[in-house]
Amino acid sequence: MNHRDTDYLYISTRLKARSQNLFSREKLNRLIAARTGEDAVKLLTENGWAAFAPDDLSACEAEIARQQQESFELLYRYAPDRRMIDLFRLKYDYHNLKSVIKADALGSDPSPLLSAAGTILPAALLFAAREHDWAKLPGAMKQAAAEAADLLARTGDPQLSDLLLDRAMTAQMLEMAQESESSFLLGYVRLMIDLQNLRVLTRAARAKKGYDYLKRAVFPGGGVTVAGLTGEVTPELLRAKFAAASFSAPVEAACAALSGGSLAALDLACDNALISYLRTSALVPFGEAQVIGYLLAKEAELVSVRTVMVGRHAGLTPEQITERLRISYV
């Protein structure tokens, strides 16, 4: 990207100010403890959210989508290079790809499942799937979509096509991070790959899946080499492979999951490790780390607010909602 840190001075200043309005754990606790749904929505509006009916989850989702789009637009307007933002929107594109490919195979309508947060209009992906014409998709995504659709048609196994698309997405993110020449961004993507591989190894061991599955499922490009593993996945193996301090909590959650513990707890620990990495951006006065940190902190906030509002709607206790929350960025 060839931008100097000083090119980010203006947007870094703006984002530091906006970060103060993100939901801290204290604010999330207040949201959980709000006496009524109306009180919960009032707390949101006091922090810049538009009002919505507290019992209308679709209205809540619409406001979450609006908040996300607003953050994208802010970053596009002031960040020196929009490709850094596009990298983090890829997961929504690939989520939509999975949905339209499976829906086409089943003859169903995936529209309710599609996200507007990607870089490609959901309608364009839906049209490509129905016409079996991926030519207008960009670069590697074009080939991956065609191969995934063909694989699903031949095998009838959606897990295989999803794995193919996951690997394509990860490879694309890694390539974009390397091209960015941002050590902070590359560090984030490599950590993301390592944590995903930790989850893959744990789930494969629990399901007693063999080497052929692992060859398709693990992702190259992380800091921990996991390719070529043929023996049993044990706690000792995981602790030896993922020995860095940043993996401490996720590895222990993975070891517990190998013995029948919660896979949700493993996912939570992995997400928290990524948020902990993002928190280091606060130590950098300005630069691309501020942009990346804010983008993902805002996303984490939206996930947390959704968790709270859905939990309240479902009648969960405050304790049940709290245990589902990731750590807060602020």
Image (cartoon, rainbow, N blue to C red):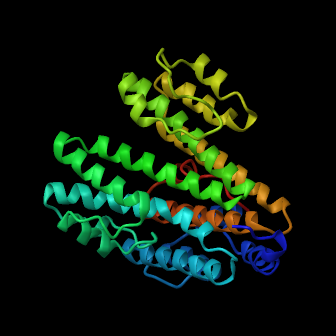
Q: Residue at x 71, y 58 (%)?
A: 181
- Apparent side of residue 26 relative to residue 171 in the rendered image (left or right): right
Q: Nearer the viewer, residue 193 or 182?
A: 182
Quarter of the rendering containing residue 102: bottom left
Q: Quadrant of the C terminus?
A: bottom right
Can residue 132 be seen in the rendering of this structure?
yes
Q: Is residue 198 above or below residue 43?
A: above
Give the tally of numbered discs: 0
Q: Position of residue 77 (x, y in %)?
A: 64, 84
Residue lying farthest to the left in this orientation? 107
Q: Position of residue 271 (x, y in %)?
A: 59, 48
Q: Is residue 199 above or below residue 315?
A: above
Can residue 314 be seen in the rendering of this structure?
no
Quarter of the rendering containing residue 226: top right
- Apparent side of residue 199 relative to residue 55 in the rendered image (left or right): right
Q: Residue at x 62, y 29 (%)?
A: 252
Q: Quadrant of the N terminus?
A: bottom right
Q: Nearer the viewer, residue 42 or 215?
A: 215
Q: Residue at x 71, y 62 (%)?
A: 26
Q: Nearer the viewer, residue 178 or 296?
A: 178
Q: Position of residue 38 (x, y in %)?
A: 51, 78
Q: Residue at x 57, y 76 (%)?
A: 72
- Apparent side of residue 130 relative to residue 7 in the rendered image (left or right): left
Q: Position of residue 59 (x, y in %)?
A: 40, 78
Q: Is residue 227 above or below residue 183?
A: above
